[in-house]
Amino acid sequence: MSQTYALTGNQIVARAALDAGCTFYAGYPISPSSEIAAEMARELPKIGGAFIQMEDEIASMAAIVGGALTGKKCMTATSGPGFSLKQENLGFACMTEVPCVVVNVMRSGPSTGMPTFPAQGDFMQTRWGTHGDHPIIVLAPCFHDELYSETIRAFNLSEKYRQPVVLLSDEVLAQMSARIDIPDRSELTIVDRAKPDTANKKGYKPYDNSQLVPPLASFFEGYHFHVTGLTHDEFGFPTENTKLAQTMLDRLNRKISENVDDICKWVEIDTADADILLVSVGSSGRSAQQAMQEARQKHGLKVGLFRPLTVWPFPEKGLRAAAQGKSRVIVAEMNEGQIALEVERVLHRPVETALRYNGEMITPDDILKQLLKERETVGV
Amino acid sequence: MSSKLAEVDYNEYLRVDRLPTTWCAGCGDGAIMKALIRAMDELKIDRDNTAIISGIGCSGRFSGYLDFNTLHVTHGRTLAFATGMKMASPKSKIIVISGDGDSLAIGGNHFIHACRRNIDLTLIIINNYTYGLTGGQVSPSTPLASSSPTAPYGSIEPTFDTCELAMAAGASFVSRTVVASPLHMDKMMKAALSHNGFSVVEVMSNCHINWGRKNEYAAAADLIKHLKDQSTFSKEEAINDGKHLLGILAQRPEMKEYSQTYYDLVERAKAKAAAKKGA
């Protein structure tokens, strides 16, 4: 049986993390994410878990990777400036395939920007923020119930694919209270990482390339394995064998690319009969949905909405199918056109945009204005 | 102090198939690794329950050679990873190996905060005056006026005293030893590993290749002798002649250890939550 609560987005993320089995949290104060740390600091001790406020953002990312190697499900939360600092050890976690969840409550930037004003400027940073090439999983909920379910999914995907997962929230979602039905834990599907066969501890290969996602042993269980950010062989030891490097990097990519159908999730509303496709991610999707409804009801425009919940890998297949035969594609977002770039790349056609990046929430009117523009004037 | 090194089967503790090491001939790292093994052997440390974490630089390679739970992390971040690991697994023993650049420069913030928390980790800082692996650049412990690729006219960078810094920041065990004295290294490491709280062992060591060659100590033996001459057990001599003071410089076992304090808090929080549920 579910129970109804009135909670802020940040509280929901913390609650979902605990329900997903998170027992270690390391963080550093930053608006507008700080309440997640406060919730975890209060709740984790009650269940025998641990919370620590580290000396900086870099350290809190490092700490959760250290914690995750002992078998615990771990999380940290931050906002843009802190997320920039976490990139170093986020890349380390991707390279070493250590599951963990990083919440980035986006705020207006660049740099320290406007700390308590909303924006969605970090879509590209989550994908390309680290050095080197590697995939990453990034989820971006739009409504409060999705904050809950996507946080659970972030932990599950992270455990399943031995992969850090970034959950993108934003200032609007994080600080706004809403009524939410939280399911009973017994109703949830919770995924735990695969553990290796205990019979052959000596021969354990933490980076066995014959498996897409090799099982991960925990520290202190008798496997004396090595974990390094250097390019490594199947046992985890540094190697300069370029053939091995190729195999390992290809596997890192394949574990995501061969599972996009499992990882990619999106919401479609009224796309079947639509003539215009609106694409929007995260809290912008709320305004997009409102604009879409007004356009249909008041202006007779047949608009459909495509709203990715998984931002990376981008739901290419779903978008292509949804955009099929549409006369216009409009991307609505709170940045200078980051998702629009991706939509153009996937669809091989120019797209229109409805953008707001001055620190205010994008409004249904912002989007409606673009919807009502004559096709000729937008030059499609 | 006994006058003979303890006999140990080093191979028992090493990943023999990973040898030989990448370290230069005559490097102090090998002698320090053997001292650590002797100390662990004497203390009968449970290897399954012990992690060795190292950072970037020549010292970073320690973790790859030792047959334990091992983690080789990003530059300067050893103590942050170690802190997370200790908090998630409070019964574990964690030994961190780092260099002067790794711990005092890029990792300086993590260093002072690990000291302040007094979390039960042992940090071995190998101070060889330089960034050896990248070619001998100036570190926070490079002696003034040293020649280096990044100080071609002589270093003007004032130095940190690692141990003074650790003590001021709150570490409850602080010691210094020198690679020239294996028996003393063993003693300091054993004492540090036996301590409950944050323990620091600074080992003065030789990088004759990338510091020594540019500063008149191109031979390993000459530099090791120089380090021995630069070391003293006399506080007066250390102050007056600017030498490295050896020995246990701080030992405060009565100080509260962080992870234990936290898990005591956990017990209280659990009890309170249970009482509330029952009420």
Image (tube, coloured by chain):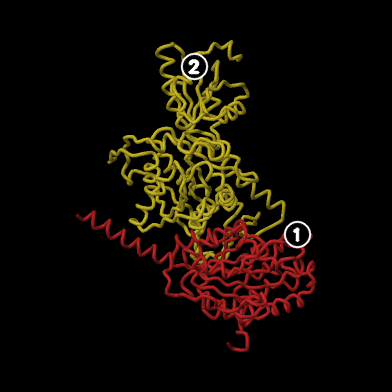
Chain colours: A yellow, B red
Disc 2: CA contacts within 10 A as few (<14), some (14-19) or many (>=20)? few
Q: Which of marks 1 and 2 is in front?
A: 1
What is the chain identity of the residue bearing mark 2? Answer: A
Q: Sort mark 1 into few (<14), some (14-19) or many (20+) by Cα contacts within 10 Å.
A: some
The residue most toward the front is: B240
Query: Which quadrant would the N terminus of chain A be assigned to in this image?
Result: top left
Q: Label 2, on which residue?
A: A369
Residue found at x 59% / y 59%: B107
| Residue in the foreground of this view, choosing between A103 and A363 | A363
Whether tag 1 and tag 2 are in contact, CB under 8 A, the answer is: no
The amino acid beneath tag 1 is Ala
Alpha carbons under labels 1 and 2: distance apart: 61 Å
Q: Say if A25 sits above or below B38 in the image.
A: above
Q: Mark 1 points at which residue?
A: B151
Q: Name the kind of residue labelled 2 in the image.
A: Lys
**Observer-nearest of A267 and B266:** B266
Residue B164 on image: x %, y %:
57, 70
The chain holding disc 1 is B
**Quadrant of the frame with the C terminus of chain A:** top right
Query: Please, what secondary structure does the residue beneath circle 1 have?
Result: loop
Residue A214: image location, x then y, percent = 55, 53
Q: Is mark 2 on a helix, strand or loop?
A: helix
The residue lying toward the viewer, choosing from B91 and A122, is A122
Query: Can the viewer see residue B49 in this picture?
Result: no
Q: Which image quarter: residue B217?
A: bottom right
Q: Residue at x 54, y 59 (%)?
A: B110
Residue under disc 1 on the same chain as residue under disc 2: no
Judge from the rendering whether residue B79 lies leftward or rightward of residue A173; answer left or right: right
Above or below, A135 relative to B212: above
